[in-house]
């Protein structure tokens, strides 16, 4: 006989409940107190009749074998009176069992042939032996149903088997082993501890660790529906015997939920505020690590991260000897959360991945940002690559309080199907501010470039296309890149759509332009990007040339939020690119990709080193403000047009030929920004406070062999009185005997006081 006396359920955080509560794929430790005995007690539905010649006890219904009795067992027979008091005890041996008749070596004294025992006048037969094998069949079924041990995943029974119960000493713990095909459930483990014995009855604590397994049946959680735990216990006197099995089914209603719900019954106690997947394609990549950041608002300190692959092809994961945890490569975390690597289960191909928990940033007492890095191994990449389209679904969830929030649920991508490098031509240039053109300059190749924050550059690159290939897109983007880990995030990008370009003799006729948003004057050549055919490079029977021109600013707007920033830079998220180029292991590069119609990508990256303001110790500078009559003053006067001068002095003689300067002005931490240059003509924007003294350029004056000055007028009526204003200047100098440009930036603020704008250094 088997009886379940009590049950309790413990979650991963150590909370113990008297009912089963979990969300999708949560681990739960189910604990049952059970009683095992080989015993039969007479009742009105189980009458026992005495036969004295030979010594027999006969059942009107039922089977002695099914009740656990076997020939050779020693049994104790107790008679009770109508008041339930034991009136005799007798010990004997079982000599035979045929159906409902058991033969005994001896009979208790005082029995009468044909005497019948029932619920009032009872007889109890108890074996001193015990079941030697116990099977625990663990499953999940819907609330409100009786269910069965057949899994809703593939119809298999998940069986935990315990052997050697009969000979196990008191307090022994027996670990279970799985029997048969285990793909009907996610990982299920168990142990059985022998706790006590009384009156021939043995008592055990059965522990089953299981996972809420409704992954493949989300419809079972609609409305008030949910899954409950199903337990069936089967006991055998002799291991694996096919007959005489004693069994019992135990189940009770549960409170369980799918993703993004507070169990089946509950009030949501956490909110997912946002998810940021930091990858080149914005998705979860199966061929390289992907950095995922998300923000949760909750007062609960119970958190967990998990992930699982969801196969589409039943032939992969159904009716297998591995559990769903292995086949679906389940991963889940426990405390501690920060800076820990959690490895997923490995599938039969050895495919697995890790979840690395990184920086945890507290935004407010109830709002926290978490970082997790998904990193597949090579076998995982190969396995997912071999799956057909649509069969690469991955789920990442984050448990906070009583909700498993979906962080990612979709098809995994290949980061970039890099088929090879772009075949480069003879031009790879970063055109400086003063090179106000879209055609190559003399020094036409740089392996990398060093420029200063706020510089405007024009990237000029030509490369070769194959006439046997159709190219559907050319992308260019500036990215922060960490070579040690392969992590990257995009700072700026643009795309040229080639899908509609006409083709003649294998050559795509390309002539595409893209407007570039920046605050340069309309006279600047860096206002528009283009992609065109470059017949000067090559045009043969098999290949032809393409030229890219992409202008951009090295951004400085630290007050603007940059999306996709890696957690290494937290809490900084601004758009000052210098920051992303100056953390150990990180650099900035511009990448060009040509993508074919079958998604093969050819790529080329070029590094950019960004310098900050005032980083040259050999240059000294002065700035001064003058009325139009030349009088030097210290404040701006409303209604006046004044002259501002910047003077730089180097310790080395200067080459006045390679020299240019700019003066910029903008309200601090906002827009618009205005510029005047010694090389790029002004467009005489009526809103620009900066005006040339003569002509259409800022004035540059070589004051001495090692000193230069840049100056212009400022119209004080066009200065914004409501905000602080930043005014700065930069100079590009070429010291004699050196080919390195020396750049310098200086700035000061203006505030309003007594009707004037006062310079604050």
Image (cartoon, grey):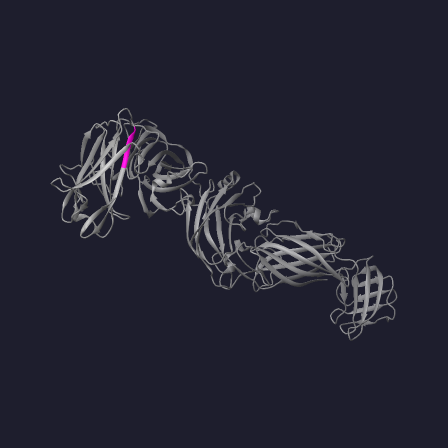
On the image, the x and y values in percent for residue 116 come to 81, 72
Residue 41, image x, y percentages: 76, 67
Q: Is 17 on the left-hand or right-hand side of 627? A: right
Q: Main secondary structure of the magenta part?
A: strand
- The quarter of the picture where residue 245 lies is bottom right
In screen coordinates, is 252 left or right of 515?
A: right
- Residue 138 lies in quadrant: bottom right
The percent position of residue 248, horizontal first and vertical second, equals 67, 61
Q: Nearer the viewer, residue 654 or 255?
A: 654
On the question of residue 254 being in view, the answer is yes
Compared with 558, 431 (above or below) is: above
Residue positioned 74% across, 52% down in the render: 164
Quadrant holding the C terminus: top left
- Residue nearest the viewer, comparing 154 with 286: 286
Outermost bottom residue: 83
Residue extending farthest left: 629
Q: Position of residue 70 (x, y in %)?
A: 79, 58
Q: Is 742 contained in the magenta span?
A: yes
Q: Is residue 574 magenta?
A: no
Observer-nearest of 553 and 759: 759
Query: Where on the picture, by quarter, is residue 481?
Result: top left
Is 34 placed left or right of 665 in the picture? right
Report if residue 683 is visible in the image. no
Relative to 80, does residue 708 appear above or below in the rendering? above
In this orientation, which residue lies closer to the viewer: 511 or 696? 696
Q: Is residue 669 above or below residue 59?
A: above
- Residue at (42%, 34%) from the top-left corner? 419
Quarter that holds the N terminus:
bottom right
Q: Which residues are magenta?
A: 740-744
């Amino acid at each position: 006989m088997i009886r379940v006396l009590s049950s309790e359920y413990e979650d991963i955080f150590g909370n113990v409940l008297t009912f089963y509560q979990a969300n999708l794929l949560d681990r739960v430790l189910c604990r049952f107190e059970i009683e095992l005995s080989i015993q039969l007690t007479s009742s009105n539905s189980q009458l026992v009749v005495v036969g004295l010649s030979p010594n027999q006890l006969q059942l009107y219904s039922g089977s002695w074998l099914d009740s656990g009795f076997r020939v050779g067992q020693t049994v104790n027979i107790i008679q009770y009176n109508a008041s339930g008091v034991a009136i005799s005890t007798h010990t004997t041996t079982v000599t035979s069992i045929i159906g409902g008749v058991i033969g005994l070596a001896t009979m208790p004294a005082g029995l009468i042939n044909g005497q019948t025992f029932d619920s009032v006048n009872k007889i109890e037969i108890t074996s001193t032996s015990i079941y030697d094998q116990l099977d625990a069949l663990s499953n999940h079924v819907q609330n409100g149903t009786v269910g069965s041990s057949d899994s809703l995943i593939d119809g298999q029974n998940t069986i935990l088997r315990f052997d050697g119960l009969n000979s196990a000493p008191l307090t022994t713990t027996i670990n279970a082993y799985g029997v048969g095909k285990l793909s009907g459930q996610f990982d299920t483990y168990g142990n059985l501890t022998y706790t006590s014995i009384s009156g021939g009855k043995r008592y055990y604590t059965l522990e089953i660790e299981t996972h809420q397994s409704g992954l493949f049946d989300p419809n079972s959680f609609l409305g008030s529906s949910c899954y409950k735990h199903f337990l069936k216990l089967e006991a055998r006197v002799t291991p694996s015997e096919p007959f005489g099995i004693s069994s019992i089914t135990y189940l009770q209603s549960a409170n369980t939920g799918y993703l993004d719900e507070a169990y089946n019954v509950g009030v949501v106690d956490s909110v997912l505020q946002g998810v940021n997947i930091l990858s080149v394609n914005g998705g979860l990549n199966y061929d390289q690590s992907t950095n995922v950041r998300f923000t949760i608002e909750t007062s609960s300190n119970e958190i967990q991260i998990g992930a699982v692959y969801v196969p589409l092809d039943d032939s992969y994961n159904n009716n297998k000897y591995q559990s769903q945890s292995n086949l679906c490569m389940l991963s889940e975390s426990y405390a501690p959360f920060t800076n820990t690597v959690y490895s997923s289960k490995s599938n039969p191909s050895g495919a697995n991945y890790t979840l690395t928990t990184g920086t945890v940033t507290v935004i407010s007492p109830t709002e926290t940002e978490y970082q997790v890095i998904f990193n597949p191994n090579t076998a995982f990449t190969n396995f997912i690559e071999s799956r057909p389209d649509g069969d690469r679904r991955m789920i990442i969830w984050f448990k906070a309080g009583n909700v498993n929030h979906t962080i990612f649920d979709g098809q995994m991508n290949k980061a970039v199907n890099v088929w090879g490098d772009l075949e480069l031509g003879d031009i790879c240039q970063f055109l400086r501010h003063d090179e106000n053109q879209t055609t190559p300059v003399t020094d036409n190749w740089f392996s990398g470039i060093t420029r200063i924050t706020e510089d405007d550059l024009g990237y000029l690159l030509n490369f070769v296309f194959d006439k046997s290939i159709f190219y559907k897109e050319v992308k260019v983007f500036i990215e922060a890149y960490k070579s040690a880990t392969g992590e990257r995030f995009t700072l700026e990008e643009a795309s040229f759509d080639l899908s509609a370009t006409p083709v003649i003799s294998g050559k795509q006729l390309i002539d595409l332009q893209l407007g570039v948003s920046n605050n340069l004057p309309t006279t600047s050549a860096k206002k528009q990007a283009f992609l065109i055919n470059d017949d000067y490079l090559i045009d043969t029977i098999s290949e032809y040339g393409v030229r890219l021109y992409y202008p951009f600013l090295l951004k400085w707007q630290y007050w603007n939020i940059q999306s996709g920033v890696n957690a290494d830079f937290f809490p900084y998220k601004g758009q000052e690119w210098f920051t992303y180029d100056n953390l150990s292991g990180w650099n900035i590069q511009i990448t060009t990709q040509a993508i074919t119609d079958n998604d093969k990508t050819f790529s080329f990256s070029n590094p950019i080193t960004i310098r900050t303001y005032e980083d040259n110790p050999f240059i000294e500078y002065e700035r001064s403000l003058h009325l139009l009559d030349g009088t030097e003053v210290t404040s701006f006067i409303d209604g006046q047009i004044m002259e501002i001068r910047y003077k730089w002095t180097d310790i080395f003689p200067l080459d006045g030929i390679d020299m240019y300067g700019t003066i910029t002005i903008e309200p601090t931490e906002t827009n618009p920004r205005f510029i005047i240059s010694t090389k790029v003509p002004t467009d005489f924007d009526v809103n620009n406070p900066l005006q040339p003294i003569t002509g259409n350029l800022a004035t540059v004056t070589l004051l001495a062999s090692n000193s230069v000055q840049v100056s212009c007028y400022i119209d004080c009526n066009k200065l914004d009185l409501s905000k602080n204003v930043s005014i700065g200047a930069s100079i590009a100098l070429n010291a004699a005997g050196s080919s390195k440009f020396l750049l310098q930036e200086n700035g000061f603020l203006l505030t309003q006081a007594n009707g004037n704008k006062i310079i604050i250094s």
